[in-house]
Image: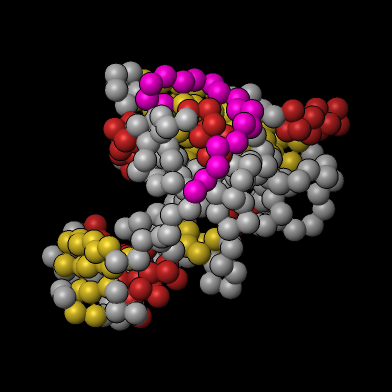
Amino acid sequence: MKEFEYIVTEQDLEKRLDTYVSSLNCDLSRSMAQKLIKEENVLVNNKPSKESYRMKLGDKVIVRIEPPKEIEVEAQDIPLDIVYEDDDIIVINKSKGMVVHPGNGNMDGTLVNAVLSHSKDSLSGIGGKIRPGIVHRLDKDTSGLIIVAKNDNAHINISEQIKNHEVTKIYTCLVKGNIEEDEATIDMPIGRDTRDRKKMAIDSEGKEAVTHFKVLKRYYDYTLLRVKIDTGRTHQIRVHMAKIHHPVVGDEVYSSGKNEFDVKGQLLHSTILEFRHPRTNEKLHFEAPLPEEFEKVLETLNKRG
């Protein structure tokens, strides 16, 4: 059992204990935090507490977590679209349908399996055997740019940039309906859906999530958007767009109704990444063109006028 100690600062005052604990680790959901609290594996000032406890300045919080059982991940010779590579990082244009790292039901065919084959032992070990080099993630059916760290120093540096909102992530997506505003910001916290644990939802007790969008083009009953996210919550763009009644085309989780293009999975692409090189501090800019499937849908819409 690993033990982690935290001191509550002003930015976390009055947060519920379960919300606070889940915010400490991006891989710890609120339900998992609640489970730890009920099992008395979370102590506030050395005593068990209720999940509804509101945090006070200077509270000492101890979280005990059973480390996950490591499993061996096999290197697989899977083609990768590498946009950039040096001794510290790899920037990859991930294809739609590829899972980033192994997990339940996806133990092979992932980006990690492919990167292990490509880079051998030259990957950051911070993510463990399941997520070597993985600094951030993209959903299975979201295509586009993703950064892989080849050593621990690069991993830590880029993680800090992401935490401090210094990494620019810009996506292109096609949504249903015509959005009236030319540009707008969606600022709604996101948490795990209490009715369906595989989904995320708008939750006042969830984690901060900020999405900026700008209209690139309006079609009949569809809108092409450029989207910039300040935070990287699970399914963030998909949840936010569905909440304002403009779900991403092809989204099989947060959208219902007609999918006239018969696309499988959302038309959402990580188009631009900007960040500082972890060793040289040089500003890097990368762009990835839209996938062929996405372009074909736009061609169909353009022909309609």
Residues 161 and 107: in front is 107
Please give left or right for residue 241 compared with residue 188 in the image.
right
Q: Is residue 85 in the magenta section?
A: yes
Residues 238 and 86: in front is 86
Q: Residue at x 60, y 28 (%)?
A: 80
Q: Predominant secondary structure in magenta? A: loop
Up the image or down, 25 lies above or below 134; here it is below
**Rendered-image quadrant of the C terminus:** top right
Q: How many marks?
A: 0
Q: Residue at x 35, y 43 (%)?
A: 126
Position of residue 192 measured from the top left corner of the image (x, y, whole percent): 50, 64
- In this orientation, does residue 117 appear? yes
Boundaries of the magenta span: 72-89
Q: Residue at x 83, y 45 (%)?
A: 262
Residues 146 and 211: in front is 146
Q: Residue at x 62, y 31 (%)?
A: 77
Q: Quadrant of residue 89?
A: top left
Up the image or down, 200 lies above or below 113; here it is below
